[in-house]
Amino acid sequence: MGKVKSKLIDWKNRLKKGHMLSIIVVLFSIIVILAILIYKKQTEYRQASENSYNMAFYEVVDYVQNVEVFLAKSLITNSPESSAESLTNVWREANLAQAYLAQLPISSNELENTNKFLNQVSEYSYSLYRKNLNDEELSDEDLKNLKDLHEYSVELENTLNQLSADINGGRISWGELTDKGTIAFAQQVSNISQDSFSNLEQNFHEYSGLIYDGAFSEHITRAEKVGLTGENIDEQAAQDKAKELFDSNNIKEVTSYGKSEGDITSFDFGITFNDNSTATVSISEKGGHVIYMNKNRDVSAEILSQEEADKKAKEYLEQHGFKNMKETYYLKESGIVTINYAYVQDDVIMYPDLIKVKVALDDGEILGIETSGYLNSHTKRDIKEPKVTVEEAKKSLNKDLTIESEELTIIPTEWKTEVLCWEFEGNVEGLDFIVYVNAETGEEEDILIITNTPNGTLTH
């Protein structure tokens, strides 16, 4: 009897131990699950924070670039109206840069110099804007201060680019900037030095990406498409037009994507070639004009020069009915050069009539064409004799400008009109620029800053 009782007690003890062990296992499992959930939430939170910081940072980069561009324009202009416009833009962009800078996870001590600069450039540009409103000329001291601010803005822009490259390359994280802001950010931004960042990976102005439309491209859309001539065509005729853009012997298959009701009504097609590369093509319903063509293939090497690529593009344009086109700006990326062309009538450049052509630098194949500007605007103009001679127009320019070329042009305006202008290209204080002076009134119409990069010529 005693033995049975002893076994029962032993069994109960084991049961209790087993029960306790089960409870411990369950509790441990709960703790592990909670830890995993907490870690996951923390990871999601960090990722959301990183995304938010990235967005704010790239806004800062963008607005600082705008500050630099508008400061440069304020140094070039000799017109009180244009000066006032540039200075108000500086004031606005600097304020916006400050607002996004405040969203970054770095204490104000580390941002002190950057904030100080943005605040100074904002307040000073606004005070000079007030001078312009009162018809006061900017003094030599004012211009010197603007020059100093511009030089500082270039340094800040370059430094932010280096910080951007470090973040994108994983060499520094927002967590490090938060934890070690005094060291990391102070070295990267507050103590700005050109020598410290001589290994800058890429020029800031190339952040605009692969698709660069050139000067005046934002004003190419019109309600009446004056370059869209001819009668309406059907889908089969449009497909035949699409195939004419390529070597017919190389086409394997054509797929119709139907009609698209965009800015210009078109028939859209996908084309597969014998090597299985593909292309997309849009042909206008009215007149059967090519609106867009883009072929996708890898470019194996850069063999052709810029001049040779330009020759190939012009030959292609001539073959497809686009005559008298002059190259303006270009951008090179991944073995492909994108060249912008403007129509020329009676030696006058028509900047509204734009066409963009992509050329492969390995064999000169045309990989893309985009004609929206041309189809919107191309027509024969009645070009009147300028009321203002080129010499008279020069008198309105800043006396410090060195003029390297001059041409008569027609440029579009933001109000969808066109203006006959003298175009002056040159240099001042190391800045390349283009100034447009109205050939009817002698007033300054626009200023573009030119950036010559290893990959092409850009304007701002």
Image: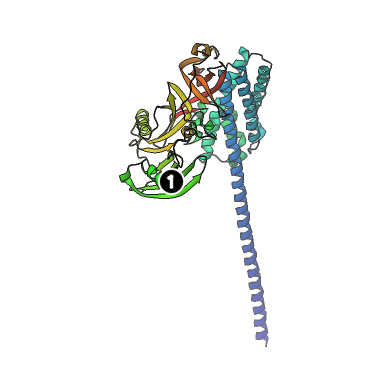
* Residue that protrudes farthest toward the front in the picture: 231
Q: Is residue 192 left or right of residue 9?
A: left
Residue 396: tell me if it is visible: yes
Q: In the depicted view, which residue is nearer to us: 415 or 328?
A: 415
Q: Is residue 253 above or below residue 152?
A: below
- Dot 1 lies on which element? loop
Q: Is residue 28 above or below residue 224?
A: below
Residue 171: tell me if it is visible: no
Dividing the picture into quadrants, the one containing residue 74 is top right
Q: In the depicted view, which residue is nearer to us: 155 or 375?
A: 375
Spot occupied by residue 293 in the image (x, y as percentages of width and height): 42, 40
**Which residue is labeled 1 in the image?**
234
Mark 1 belongs to which amino acid?
Asp
Quadrant into which the N terminus falls: bottom right
Q: Is residue 34 left or right of residue 327?
A: right
Dividing the picture into quadrants, the one containing residue 26 is bottom right
